[in-house]
Amino acid sequence: MSFPTAPGLTRVHPTDPAPVLVMPARLAFIDVPPLCAQLEALYAAGSAEVVCDLGALIRADLTAVETVARLRLTAARAGGRLTIRNAGPGLVALLTLVGLVE
């Protein structure tokens, strides 16, 4: 039996050794500090890299950009890597516009 992963929880996929931080479908600014705290906890537990899955996001807006920016800052402060995956084209365009795409 398989159950969907709840947003914000971490999971490890057998083919992906890095923990995954899953974003909820809708983000609000109040969601950012707890997500950053979860990311910090993953790095404190010994993870060198964390994957941030943005596939569930419904809208590409400034809240999503703020979330990615704060998560990248948190990763940099912890000395870890943050990999973004499943970002939609609208969010990729916004992240590129503000300089958050490498």
Image (spheres, grey):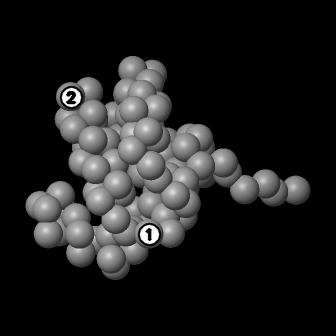
Sequence-wise first label, 1 or 2: 1
Q: Nearer the viewer, residue 52 or 66?
A: 66
Instruction: Tell me if I can see residue 61 in this picture.
Output: yes
Q: Nearer the viewer, residue 45 or 62?
A: 62
Give the vertical position of 41 relative to 58 (above or below): above
Q: Residue 21 — which label?
A: none
Q: Nearer the viewer, residue 25 or 21?
A: 25
Mark closer to the observer (1, 2): 1
User: Within 10 Å of the Cα at label 2, are there few (<14), some (14-19), or many (20+) other Cα atoms?
Assistant: few
State the SS at label 2.
helix
Amino acid at dot 2: Arg
- Horizontal and vertical percent for residue 44? 39, 20
- Horizontal and vertical percent for residue 17? 49, 46
Find residue 71 and report its image quarter.
top left
Furthest-top residue in this view: 44
Query: Quarter holding the N terminus?
Result: bottom right
Image point (28%, 50%), residue name:
66
Amino acid at dot 1: Arg
Q: Nearer the viewer, residue 82 or 64?
A: 64
Find residue 99 and report its image quarter.
bottom left
Instruction: Tell me if I can see residue 12 in this picture.
Output: no
- Describe residue 94's horizontal placement relative to residue 86 as left or right: left
Image point (23%, 69%), residue name:
94
**CA separation, marks 1 and 2?**
28 Å
User: Within 10 Å of the Cα at label 1, are there few (<14), some (14-19), or many (20+) other Cα atoms?
Assistant: some
Q: Residue 59 — which label?
A: 1
Image point (40%, 62%), residue name:
85
Image point (39%, 44%), residue name:
29
Which residue is labeled 2 in the image?
77
Furthest-right residue in this view: 1
Query: Quarter holding the C terminus?
Result: bottom left
> What is the total number of numbered labels drawn onto the structure image?
2
